[in-house]
Image (cartoon, helix red, strand yellow):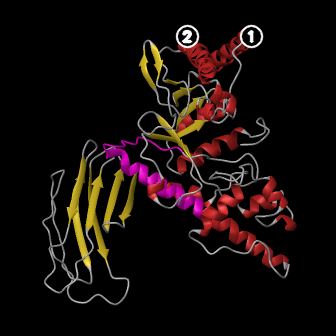
Amino acid sequence: MDIIHSKPTENEIRQMTADAREANMNMLRVWGGGNYFSHAFYDACDELGVLVWQKAMFACGMYPRHEPFLKEIEQEVSFQAFRLGSHPSIVILGSNNENENSMDWFKVTWDNRIRYAVDLYKIFVDTVGAALNKVDPHVLYIDTSPSNGVISEDPYVKRYGNTNCIEYGDVHFYDYVNDGLSYSTFPKAKFVSEFGFQSFPSFEAYRAVSSPEDWSYDSELSEFRQRHPNGNKELLSQLERHFTLPLARDPDENPKRQELLFKHWIYLTQLHQALCYDTAVRYWRSLKSDPKALTRGALYWQLNDIWQGPSWSGINYGGQWKLLHYVARQFFAPFAISTRLHKANQTLEIHVTSDVNSELQVSMEGKVIPLEGEPTGPVETIKETTNLRLMRLAPWYLSLSTIFFQWVAPIRSTTASSISWRPLPPPPGRRRHRRLKIVIRRC
């Protein structure tokens, strides 16, 4: 919450946790590059029903394994496990963030993979894992994240390989090259424990640490506070796919217009970020019933900022919500709808995802209308109501101008319901409609 870890008050910590709950989040991950929170955070999670994935403070690199350091690790982990063990919100204990993954980042680890794999095992299995097991032998422990999991727990045998493999474990996913507003960009992973796109902080937050000469995305301060290499260039590249961008600087050097240009830029970065997260989360939630994916969760990076600068966060430094956090209330809602258009065969998929702990009766209407001209002729309607978990609709030929469909079907916690509809062949000389595939799932 702040570069100075002791600075946030208990009320500010509780407010941050309440903001996460307000956005329909049910889990927060305390990453290994941060710090162990005070009891105020875990108390708030206990009270608000927010689950916690707590990591030990190791991240993104190699650590020594000489005996004095291992003893220090054991003492730290044991102390924190005893200190936090009474909080029911902590459901996962992890040892590190991306340490095994970071073996792919450096030449020295590429050239000595067995040596560093032995080091990682000694630290995070034999030391951290063993220390946690002494405190609580039933704890759910993950020795690294992302991870392919283990082949066996007794004896403990890790599944080595690409740590971001979608077939096993959890995945960290970042792609600043392909279109973040296309669902096809995102992997069919089992659990996405980290992903994200950047945006600039809101103007009011940024103004507190800047001057008018800084109010441009190519200013010296904007570049300095951008801690991701090539981050602003990647933002530009992504935004250019979908938006007409404002000038970096007003040609007349008018201060008022320059401020408006910068505010326009900030808004577009936050809009793009929100749309990217919305696309990704709705897609992953719809994959829970896909037998090739069975996606069980998505945590994005990151909830909040520790200073004012471009980042992946949904909450500004100081607590003000970005656009992303408002949109998160929708894509994390217990009942959510997502669509996917397959351009190749002109098939539309509509997914209904429910985390409501009861069977629901769902009614939905949809129309496909021409982009040009007015609908002509009567609108034919498909209507059926059923108490079965799977309802089927017979093929139906509708008017060329408008396609209208309606259904009511139960959504169950353990089954998937789907409806497929295609129009009958059109009469000779008349054009065929687009095909529609409607999918309803209780996820």
The CA distance from mark 2 to mark 1 is 20 Å
For residue 117, side relative to residue 158 (left or right):
right
- Residue 107, label in figure: none
Would you say residue 59 sits in the magenta stretch?
A: no
Res 45 seen here: yes
For residue 294, side relative to residue 326 (left or right):
left
The residue closer to the viewer here, 382 or 71, is: 71
- Residue 68, label in figure: 1
Residue drawn at x 37%, y 51% as measured from the top left: 286
Residue 31 sits in which quadrant? top right
Q: Is residue 69 above or below residue 272?
A: above
Residue drawn at x 16%, y 79% as measured from the top left: 426
For the residue carrying disc 1, how many other residues have a C-alpha within 10 Å: few (<14), some (14-19), or many (20+)? few
Region rendered in magenta: 271-299
Location of the N terminus by quadrant is: top right
Q: Position of residue 177 (x, y in %)?
A: 58, 57
For residue 63, side relative to residue 164 (left or right):
right
Of the two numbered discs 2 and 1 on the same chain, state the one appearing first in sequence. 1
The amino acid beneath tag 2 is Lys
User: Which residue in the structure is indicated by mark 2?
Assistant: 134
Q: Position of residue 165 (x, y in %)?
A: 47, 37
Residue drawn at x 34%, y 57% as measured from the top left: 351
For residue 80, side relative to residue 92 (left or right):
right
Secondary structure at badge 2 equals helix
The amino acid beneath tag 1 is Pro
Secondary structure at badge 1 equals helix
For the residue carrying disc 2, how many other residues have a C-alpha within 10 Å: few (<14), some (14-19), or many (20+)? few
Q: Is residue 113 above or below residue 339?
A: above
